[in-house]
Image (cartoon, helix red, strand yellow):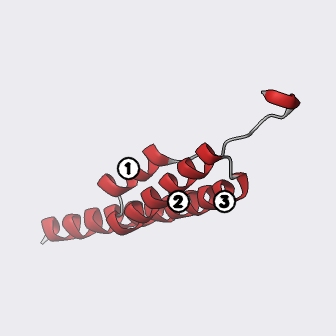
């Protein structure tokens, strides 16, 4: 790096966002993809504050989407198993 300065890039969580979109929770996954792209763009231009903020938002959306997806899967499995017992 020039001048002894190192630039730290914020994680984008893009693959996690794509996984959540396809497998867990579509609306939250799409929002997470948008914030992941904002993080990537901010990293490229060197805006570390904006990148860190967008990265935190993408991570939160991915966590919420994953939890919602798991809860939905559990509910579907329980309902299916109750219908099979009748």
User: Relative to residue 1, is residue 26 depicted above or below?
Assistant: below
| Cα gap from disc 2 to disc 1, whole angstroms | 13 Å
- Marks 1 and 3 close (CB-CB < 8 Å): no
Q: Position of residue 3 (x, y in %)?
A: 87, 30
Residue that mark 3 sits on? 50
Q: Residue at x 49, y 58 (%)?
A: 62
Residue that mark 1 sits on? 18
Tell which of 1 and 68 is nearer to you: 1
Tell which of 2 and 61 is nearer to you: 2
Q: Which mark is residue 63?
A: 2
Which structural element holds mark 1? helix
How crowded pointer 1 is (Cα within 10 Å; few <14, some 14-19, many 20+) is rated as: some
Q: Residue at x 57, y 57 (%)?
A: 59
| Cα gap from disc 1 to disc 3, whole angstroms | 21 Å
What is the residue that sits farthest to the right in this orientation?
4
Image quarter of the N terminus: top right
Q: Residue at x 43, y 52 (%)?
A: 17
User: Relative to residue 75, is residue 70 depicted above or below?
Assistant: above
Which structural element holds mark 2? helix
């Amino acid at each position: 790096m020039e001048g002894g300065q190192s630039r730290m890039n914020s994680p984008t969580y893009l693959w996690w966002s794509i996984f959540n979109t396809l497998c867990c929770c579509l609306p939250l996954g799409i929002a997470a993809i948008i914030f992941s792209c904002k993080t990537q763009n901010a990293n490229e231009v060197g805006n570390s504050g904006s990148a860190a903020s967008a990265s935190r938002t993408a991570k939160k959306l991915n966590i919420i989407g994953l939890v919602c997806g798991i809860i939905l899967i559990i509910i579907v499995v329980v309902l299916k198993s109750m219908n099979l017992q009748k």
